[in-house]
Image (cartoon, helix red, strand yellow):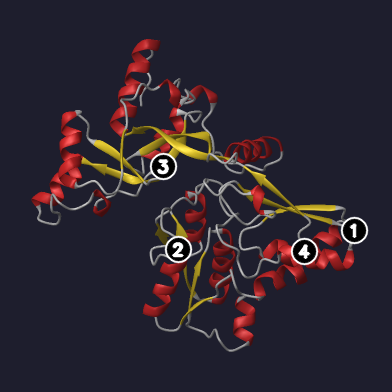
Amino acid sequence: MIEDAEKQGVLRSGDVIIEPTSGNTGIGLGLVAAVKGYRCIIVMPEKMSLEKVNVLKALGVEVVRTPNTANLNSPDSHIGMAWKLKSEIPNSHVFDQYQNASNPLAHYDITAEEILDQCEGQVDVVVMGAGTGGTITGIARKFKEKCPNCEIIAVDPEGSTMAEPEELNFPDQISYEVEGIGHRFIPTVLDRKVIDKWLKTNDEESFAMARMLIKKEGLLCEKGFLHADSDQKSWWNVPINQMKLPSTLTVLPTISCQDIIQILKENSMNTAVVIDSNGTVLGLVTLGNIKSLVHEGKLQLTDLVSKVIYQQFKKVKLSDTIGKILQILTLNHFALIVHEQIHSNGSGECGKREMVHGVVTFNDLITFIADKKKTMGTAEKY
């Protein structure tokens, strides 16, 4: 994309590269920008891993994070923010990998040829994830020409709506943790006609396979990835479902701040989860935050809680561990524990939806760890 933009005279020395990405394309752009001397700004959702951020910053890339909850068409989304930055920064360019024809062309000309060369021109099946769709589109088009009997299989996470036929998708599930693949729209560069079959995968099996591959096939350089077993805390792998959490209050975004204050006080609670009419989590509100904003004159008691929803939180499952939630709470104020429920819409069709099990704060976690240590009679530091 960079070389084509240079050849066309669009990208010149001193210009700025901006790109919305899950981080993978961003790293590629960052590498080339570092070599060629361009300033590079990468915009990516907060759910993307810290490892990607560290790699990007090491390449000299400026990283801008956007809320996970932002709608794709929202100015707060990673795509919306990238175009906003372009409008504010002179001589800047958004290559827009979702629509840029150079994206699949690079994989048609280079990636596909590399695979064919390694396999001596014989490929029976190729399985790939689809993010923008550039990789799978470019490779599939080349393989259809040189290995016409090769089967092209695309992998799409549950929560994404890119797969065909439509019945494979889960329209009620809108979130997933796996990075770099899946969208709730069809990118322009994705040619679904060259894909023979779609497979859906979920977070649990994806992460289990990733860890298995790291354990059996991966090359872990240095020594800072995992603690030695002797250093592992006894509570680290304890499942979250062993935590005893108070009941969770869920409210609709149409309730007033005055009413939510009264409800929270009556139930000796500090936090409520805001959900829509379908049960989808929109965020959280806290008694302390509402009171503070009212005191500062920034909020009226008659205002709806939708005005003060706190959207910076991570979701975890009951099967996740205390160690995972500790890592989350070092960067976030809350963690929302959810579990999936299968429901029927009354017409014989079933779907999945997330149900709220509880809200965990850092204080909740430290209390649990302290109690766990007393029970086990250990003298671990935490």
Residue under pointer 1: 149
Instruction: Report the amino acid beneath label 3.
Output: Gly
Instruction: Report the amino acid beneath label 2.
Output: His
- Height in image: 43 above or below 242? below
Q: Nearer the viewer, residue 225 or 18?
A: 18
In primary-sequence order, the first of circles 1 and 3 is: 1
Residue under pointer 2: 78
The crowd level at tag 2 (other Cα within 10 Å; few <14, some 14-19, many 20+) is many
Residue ranking furthest to the bottom: 9
Find residue 250 and report its image quarter.
top left
What is the C-alpha distance between the residues marked 3 and 4? 37 Å
What is the C-alpha distance between the residues marked 3 and 2? 25 Å
In primary-sequence order, the first of circles 2 and 1 is: 2
Going by the image, does 97 lie left or right of 232?
right
Q: Are marks 2 and 4 in contact (CB under 8 Å)?
A: no
What is the C-alpha distance between the residues marked 4 and 1? 12 Å
Front of the two marks 2 and 1:
1
In primary-sequence order, the first of circles 3 and 2 is: 2
In primary-sequence order, the first of circles 3 and 4 is: 4
Q: Position of residue 279 (x, y in %)?
A: 41, 42
Q: Are marks 3 and 2 in contact (CB under 8 Å)?
A: no
Front of the two marks 3 and 4:
3
Going by the image, does 188 lie left or right of 230?
right
Check residue 194 in the rendering and tell me which mark sits there, or answer none. 4
Residue under pointer 3: 279
Residue 72 visible to the viewer: yes
Q: Nearer the viewer, residue 213 or 68?
A: 68
